[in-house]
Image (cartoon, rainbow, N blue to C red):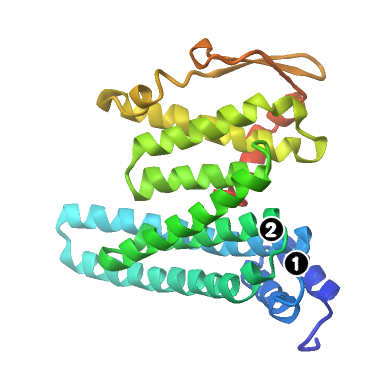
Amino acid sequence: MASSLSRDQYVYMAKLAEQAERYEEMVEYMEKLVKESTPASELSVEERNLLSVAYKNVIGSLRAAWRIVSSIEQKEEGRKNEEHVTLVKEYRSKVESELSEVCAGILRLLDSNLVPSANSGESKVFYLKMKGDYHRYMAEFKVGDERKAAAEETMLAYKAAQDIALADLSPTHPIRLGLALNFSVFYYEILNSSEKACAMAKQAFEEAIAELDTLGEESYKDSTLIMQLLRDNLTLWTSDMQSEHGCARANGGSIGLIYALYSSDSCIFSIDPSLHFLLLFGRMSRLMRHKDWNIVRLEGRWA
């Protein structure tokens, strides 16, 4: 194969690598496309989504590996098996080096090519959110000053993305909702600020609910699924924090559940009246029948 392909060929090869679940190669194809095309021109929506999927799958497997190894390390420390602890620590360090390398790679690409090439508000939010995501992944395993620096960079990127999203994107836009989802997770998991996390997720959910009837068919699926993830997080965080009067007190009561009544082609939502929402009518029955599959697929794109 020629060392340099056309833009369309890189896209095709990235899709081929995705189908073969060879995500490291998918990253390589998309990296070459980015370096040869930007910042002189902007990536298409399809191209930027392929880039996101490629990196998300590579980093996702490494994050999962790190969590598993860290859990084993804790168990071995509890058993006071020093020999095993030493081996596990070395292995964890290896995984962390790979995590750092992947994060550093996409962050360099974002700073040098992708963010400078972004012309629309949508693409700017997409790339700044992505920048925040990968700094957040660094903060998950770094310690001390490195963790603090990663958290600060995450905050800067998410805040910059949020400022543009609030000005340029509707409350139901899937990229704006995805930003709110990940930003709130950052507050909850990295900054340990449950009240701020709940307030942010709840506000994004409420604002989207208020405009759900204006949502176009093309983004209805992604937007409603991210709203479901926001609601699930709120329910979980509220349950976890009730004993400490965290989210429930901060937001004036329990989050409540969504109840759905299905007909053949429609779904009526009724929200807990403590949130003061009206009944909403949505075309969601076909989405919710495949909720688990869609959420797994979406988690690869947003979380």
Q: Where's residue 182, x and y in %?
A: 51, 47
Quarter of image, res 290: top right
Circle 1 crowding by C-alpha within 10 Å: few under 14, some 14–19, many from 20 = some
- Label 1 SS: loop
Q: Residue at x 60, y 41 (%)?
A: 177
Q: Where's residue 98, x and y in %?
A: 45, 72
Quarter of image, res 124: bottom right
The residue indicated by pointer 2 is 123
Q: Where's residue 10, x and y in %?
A: 78, 74
276 left or right of 79 in image: right
| In the rendered image, the vertical position of residue 271 relative to residue 78, given as above or below | above
The kind of residue tagged 2 is Ser
Q: Residue at x 56, y 64 (%)?
A: 58
Quarter of image, res 236: top left
Q: Is residue 179 visible?
A: yes
Q: Is residue 296 visible?
A: no
Count the marks. 2
| In the rendered image, the vertical position of residue 61 relative to residue 251, given as above or below | below
265 left or right of 96 in image: right
The kind of residue tagged 1 is Leu
- Label 2 SS: helix
Q: Which mark is on residue 43?
A: 1
96 left or right of 20 in image: left
Q: Nearer the viewer, residue 236 or 135?
A: 135
Q: CA distance from mark 2 to mark 1?
A: 9 Å
Q: Residue at x 33, y 71 (%)?
A: 93
